[in-house]
Amino acid sequence: LTMLPFYAAGIFLTYRLGRKLYGVTVGAWAAAILAVWPPFYNYSLEFRTDQLWMVLWLAALAVWFSGRRSPGRGFAVGLLLGATMAASLKTSPMLACFAGAVVLTQAMSRSQPVRWRTVLRDLGLIAAGMLVVPAICCLQFWRLGALGDLYRGAIGHNLMPDLHRHRSAWAQSVEFAILLCLAWWLLKRFGFARKLSKINQARLTMIWLTVL
């Protein structure tokens, strides 16, 4: 029963995202399908941190897409992303994908020039907000004298053994960046970039986030 609120929140936030990006009909159908989708229903009732992570991640996306960018919205998104990071470290690759989606959307936008001062301000506010919840968690573990346990449980447990014998994450990141640049060149070469630039920025960001 304790998981039912997260189940309901996931459905509601899916509706909010669908309504904002594509309209009320799409949002309602997305929520209805998700509510009766067997894997979502079954896994949502399991007692695990993934339910909390799902709701926080969807909430961060909903706040980001719900209106125009502002200092308050940026900080609120940062707070939610920080809470998401505290819930699960799987947020790290998701953040990289989200940042890449935003950058690609801005690069393809022809409606208005990029204001780098505003972009840096927003990034700073998001980063500041992201520090709040993890800092509170670290402070609490420090008060209990359990920082070592926090590291072993949240970070050390997720480190791959013999990582040095495999390709480093940096090498994979470089390969991914090269493939992304190649895809961008192909889009421009065959005229798809111009067509994509006409799509609503929020929709285009979600498209890139899904692709990444």
Image (cartoon, grey):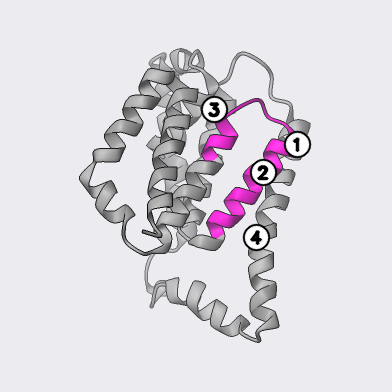
Residue that badge 1 annotates: 71
Structural distance between the alpha carbons of marks 4 and 1: 18 Å
Residue that badge 3 annotates: 105
Q: Nearer the viewer, residue 156 or 133?
A: 133
Please identify the quadrant where the N terminus is shown: bottom left
Q: Position of residue 65 (x, y in %)?
A: 56, 30
Q: Secondary structure at mark 3?
A: helix
Residue 45 visible, this orientation: yes
Check the image and report above or below for 91 versus 159.
above
Amino acid carrying label 3: it is: Thr
Q: Answer yes or no: do the residues labelled 4 and 3 have beta carbons within 8 Å?
A: no
- Which of the 4 image quadrants contains residue 184? top left
Q: Nearer the viewer, residue 67 or 120?
A: 67
Mark 4 or mark 1, earlier in chain = 1
Structural distance between the alpha carbons of marks 4 and 3: 28 Å
Residue 159 visible, this orientation: no
